[in-house]
Amino acid sequence: MRYILTIATCLAVSTATIGAEPKTFRTDHALVTYAGIDERHAEAIARTVEAARAAAGDFGFNMPETVEVTVTADRAGRVRLFTDGQDHYFLSIRTQQDLRKPSQTGMFHLYGLCHETGHLAMYRAIRDHGWMTPAAAEGWAHYIGSRFVDAVHARQGKKLWPDSYDYLADGTQRLNAQLAGKKPSPVVKGAALWKELAAIVGDKGVAPIFAAWGKAKIDPFDPGGALRKALLATNADKRLAEWWNKAEPLLVFKRPRSGFAARTAKPAELSGRPVEHAHDDGGQAGKKSIAGGGHAVKFQAPGDGWYLTAVRIHGSRYGYPRPPRESIRLWLCDKDFKVIAELAFPYSSFTRGPSKWVRLRLPTPTNVPPGFIVCVGFNPTATKGVFVSHDKAASGNSLTGLPGRGSRDFTRGDWMIRASLDQLRIADALKPPK
């Protein structure tokens, strides 16, 4: 077989690659675009991804026709590997020396490529995976990635990596040793649950479950009910119910719901004179996309009886020309970052190009407590997301994070996110009702 590996062209130019034209190495179902490494390493990456992709197909997962990998080298950067969840991997290194065997670097690149293939298989089937805990997502990638390492070894042999080593030891051999340990981590516990599920339904029985979960309508405050129903509908094996009872507490994240009693109003019931609240000064000093998190701002209502009617965000979309099919999430939260209301808006609300103000209007205005937080999440990757603008002076009201998953102060400035509040229309005593 002639191999074709694709590494996407999203290269960071560095002291190691200045002036270097990116090269490509291709296999049948992979394309690598690389700079800062030699062809031997590009070929090894390509062959690894090619074989891992084939293994995922053997498990019944719908994989992309071509997996694209981008390799960048930056002496001042850090070593990192991640996927966009659709068809791209991004590997950043400092120099080619970072690709040596794990005993020399402490980094497991071959296993890592198999691990990301596991994420790709899952995320293509379950696009909205906000209900997953790290034990669920990372546990799956660790379990199936370990299986893929074995499959890659069977297809490509023991001398696949230029700095040859016994990478088969990084597959199910290592996983089984971890499972036998006295104090397995949450990720290893998650891997154990996925291994148990595969033992019940068979290797090709997991993909239909993921597909069913991807189509299910999930309540973020209580995802378990819909997930359980979809799971049991895929297979009549009675062991699945027992498995789910054990798995749900570890794998499923329930978004905390606020105790604030929210009320909604029709736009016609409001005064029509909304007041916009802001902490930013209107001057863009920078912009940022936050993988695995969101942009949040704390606000204070002028008093009781105020309703959130719209949120304005200064930003611009990046990535492919066509906007993603998924939605932007906007959360109205109390001061403890617990959700009062969750809304979805189309990704196409933001356009590519220069940053500009985008108004997201609430279809049903919702009342707010005296102290509240507005958070927006774009689920960004390297190939899609929104850069949200910030000014240059931090007031202490801007955060990064997601409801229920923790937050941190954003100290580079204030997010350019504004909240419009309005009050109910007050009856005019001089004008009798009609």
Image (cartoon, rainbow, N blue to C red):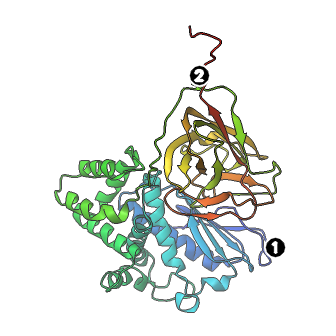
Q: Which residue is mark 1?
A: 18
Q: Which residue is mark 2?
A: 268
Quarter of the image for residue 367 reads top right
Q: Nearer the viewer, residue 29 or 197?
A: 197
Quarter of the image for residue 270 reads top right
Q: Give the residue at the far top of this rendering.
A: 434
Vertical relation: 365 (above or below) 418: above
Residue 99 - label = none
- Residue 151 can be seen, yes or no: no
Task: Give the crowd class for mark 1: few <14, some 14-19, many >=20 residues within 10 Å.
Answer: few
Q: Pointers 1 and 2 in contact (CB under 8 A)?
A: no
Provide residue 399's location: percent of width, then percent of height: 64, 59
Residue at 74 percent across and 59 percent down: it is: 395
Residue at 65 percent across and 12 percent down: it is: 430
SS at mark 1 in the image = loop
Give, as a three-letter code, the residue at label 2.
Answer: Ala
Disc 1 and disc 2: Cα gap in Å?
A: 59 Å
Give, as a three-letter code, the residue at label 1.
Answer: Ile
